[in-house]
Amino acid sequence: MIEHRVVRLCFVLILATVALACGPQPPVRTVVAIDGMHCDGCEEAITQAVAALPGVVEVTADHERGEAIVVYRPNEVSEEEITSTIEDLAYTVAGTKTEAVVAG
């Protein structure tokens, strides 16, 4: 009887540890340098495509600056998936810069 309780307790502790390790990660902010944006329509196309990815919290594109700023949860979507989505629209990703989002 006691052995079953110990086994059950160990199982619960293992599940709790896994849940904590795999829990939500804080969002990150990536600035994506993009070549080929020329107008508001380009901004809209990139914004809609990237916003549709799971895990994207916020996205803004600016053709005058030649960049998109994407806030996302890295455990749900990768930087590579974001840049690939932009390149699938026939734009060129010239580089990225990623940083943690600071709350406050």
Image: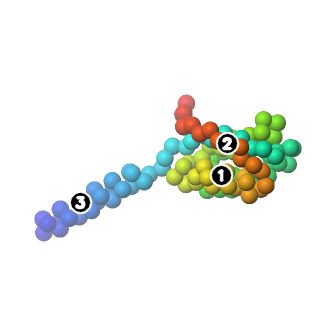
Whichever of labels 2 and 1 marks the residue nearer the N terminus, that label is 1
Instruction: Pinpoint residue 83: horizontal percent, then vertical percent.
Output: 67, 51
> Is residue 60 in view?
no
Left or right: 67, with 98 as reference point: right
Whichever of labels 2 and 3 marks the residue nearer the N terminus, that label is 3
Instruction: Pinpoint residue 102: horizontal percent, then vertical percent.
Output: 54, 33
For the residues marked 3 and 1, what is the alpha-carbon distance in whole angstroms? 40 Å
Name the residue: 62% across, 38% down. 97
Q: SS class of the residue under badge 2?
A: strand
Mark 1 is surrounded, within 10 Å at the Cα level, by few (under 14), some (14 to 19) or many (20 or more) other residues, namely: many
The residue lying toward the viewer, choosing from 21 and 3, is 21
Total labels: the figure holds 3
The amino acid type of the residue labelled 3 equals: Cys
Instruction: Indicate which disc residue 95 carries.
Output: 2
Badges 3 and 1: C-beta atoms under 8 Å apart? no
The residue tagged 3 is: 10
Instruction: Pinpoint residue 11: horizontal percent, then vertical percent.
Output: 27, 62
Name the residue: 56% across, 48% down. 73
For the residues marked 2 and 1, what is the alpha-carbon distance in whole angstroms? 12 Å
The residue tagged 1 is: 82
Q: Quadrant of the N terminus?
A: bottom left
The residue lying toward the viewer, choosing from 80 and 75, is 80
For the residues marked 2 and 3, what is the alpha-carbon distance in whole angstroms? 46 Å
The amino acid type of the residue labelled 2 equals: Gly
Instruction: Indicate which disc residue 60 carries.
Output: none
State the image quarter where residue 67 is shown. top right
Badges 2 and 1: C-beta atoms under 8 Å apart? no
Q: SS class of the residue under badge 3?
A: helix
